[in-house]
Image (tube, helix red, strand yellow):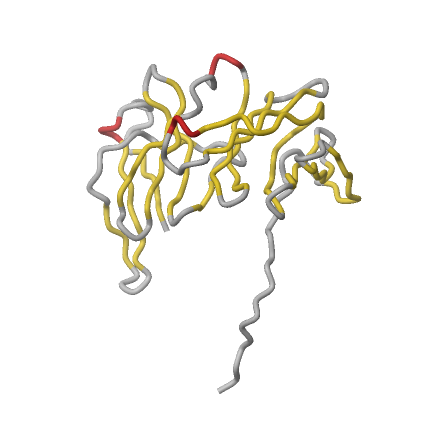
Amino acid sequence: MLEIVNEDDDEYWSIDCIKYEIYNLSTDSWREIDAVVPRALHSLCFELFFNGACHMLSRRAYFGPIILCFAISSEVFTIIDFPESCSELDGKHSSLTVLNECLAMVRYQEWMKEPRLIDIWVMKEYGVKESWIKQFIVGPILLMCPLSSWKNYMLLMESGDGQLVSCELNTNTFKKFEIYSDRINSLRVIIFKESLVSRINT
């Protein structure tokens, strides 16, 4: 478990006031990680565990958003840059997912009032900024929040009216499910995969 501790709310962007702690289950204790890195920001539907690392939204002061990665095994932080053409100035929100075993980023207009197109970027070579490509443009749809990807070609999302919707990326085909959230941004998706390994009673 990784915890982010802010020691001074008045110094929001100062890295001197941010520390990261990791929980050790075997010793039932927390310890601080010796690293000087940007603050991780809470962002709806952005956090992702992939390729052995936790991926979080962050930003360099005055230089725009970045993806902050924490490798669990090595306890090392790295940074992945956004695609070159993606910035905070375009008014779009970002969400991370996985498509065909690649890191992917969904870019969409935040707090839509009318249906809009959605851009889906895929990082073909993990960690290499130049390998980002805009692979899909889907919609238009009134989107509240992307939730997860499924079968490597389908995106599950919460629509603007709180309904669960899927989009087949290759055909831009949408399907609505009779599942609704009881409040805005409350739908969540967990992908369950069956296993051939059975539990053996001993």
Where residue 13 sits: x, y (%)?
A: 31, 23
> Among all residues in the image, which is located at the extreme bottom?
202
Q: Furthest-left residue in view?
A: 34
Residue 89: where, in percent of width, then height? 48, 12
Q: Residue at x 53, y 72 (%)?
A: 197
Q: Residue at x 50, y 27 (%)?
A: 133
Above or below, comparing residue 114 to residue 48 in the picture: above
Q: Position of residue 65 (x, y in %)?
A: 40, 23
Q: Is residue 177 left or right of residue 68?
A: right
Q: Nearer the viewer, residue 2 or 171?
A: 171
Residue at 33% across, 27% down:
9
Q: Is residue 164 above or below residue 141?
A: below
For residue 59, which quarter of the picture? Answer: top left
Q: Residue 175: percent from the left, percent from the top?
A: 77, 39
Q: Is residue 142 left or right of residue 195?
A: right
- 192 up-or-down from 144: above or below: below
